[in-house]
Amino acid sequence: MRMTDVFAVERGSFTDLAALARFHYAGGAPGVPARILRAMDRVRGELIGVLVVSSPPLNGAWRERAWPHLFGDAGSGRMSRRDAATALNRHVRTISRVIVEPRRRSMGVGAMLVRTYLGDALTPLTEAIAAMGRYTSLFERCGMRVVECARSTRDYRLIDALAHEGIAPIDLVDPERAVELMRRAFVRDEVDRWLNAARGTRGLLSTARVERSAVAGRSIIARPVVYVHGEPGEGAHERADSGRAGAGGDCLLRVGGGAAAHPARAPAA
């Protein structure tokens, strides 16, 4: 029996995302969805997985290595941030969530969701930023290339602050230890500073101390791995020449390869 005889991928909704959101390791909500796909068990009529596609973050240190000469440094003065955002939005979407119901993991559901999206992508180029990317080959198995980037400034600051106090990042994840650490004003302020430095985690500032500590700790323990898909055509280069996006940084492209780009389409919810 083929996998498609049992599982089906179709257009999903915010309701599907909400139903499975608690099973994802990342804290906070993904960016505003441009498309949501869901995986269903045909036999039981059960929701078993969801994939979310969002607009890409403006600053992406990996893009110049992933797609040379298409995206430059948005802060270089070659174009305004507004123009950079417009150019980036024209070419790229980000797979911001892939969530599989725990009982259905290791059954190929996540790969089916990713392959389905890449086969009918909203833009010629797709990227995925995975905090746990070192521990899964999901995106690589679906034909995406791996780009490893340097840590963010906020990560370095928090790591240095913890080291100054003799604290290991893993201590932030341990619930009992975190309760003790987050009673210290210095540690609490540094964790909150880390959360406030990015839109994706800013909303967690109102959550419990232990939760804030765990999100920061998990992030600096597991450096994100970026996966990219698609190659820009000549037309894409011409359009991007008048507006380059992304941010410079120290990135190491680890795996080559790639797949043909898909025609750009208007975002759909």
Image (cartoon, rainbow, N blue to C red):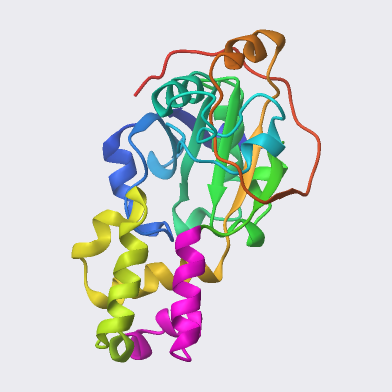
Q: What stretch is highlighted in magenta?
A: 153-178
Residue at the outermost right position: 256
Is 233 drawn above or below residue 181 in the view shown? above
In the rendered structure, does residue 165 fall within the stretch colored magenta? yes
Which image quadrant: the C terminus? top left
Left or right, residue 211 beside residue 71: left
- Specify the principal SS of the magenta part: helix
- Toward the viewer: 170 or 53? 170
Q: Decide if residue 22 is on the left or right side of residue 231.
A: left
Return the x and y of residue 39 as percentages of the image width and height. Answer: 46, 37
Most extreme residue toward the left is: 206
Q: Determine the residue positioned at 47% across, 25% down.
A: 84
**For the image shown, how many numbered marks are present on the structure?**
0
Nearer-the-camera pick, 115 or 161: 161
**Whole-percent x and y of residue 63?**
63, 36
Residue at 35% x, 56% y: name it.
197
Q: Is residue 94 above or below residue 11?
A: below
Which quadrant of the figure has residue 57? top left
Q: Does the magenta stretch include residue 35?
A: no
**Residue 178 visible in image:** yes
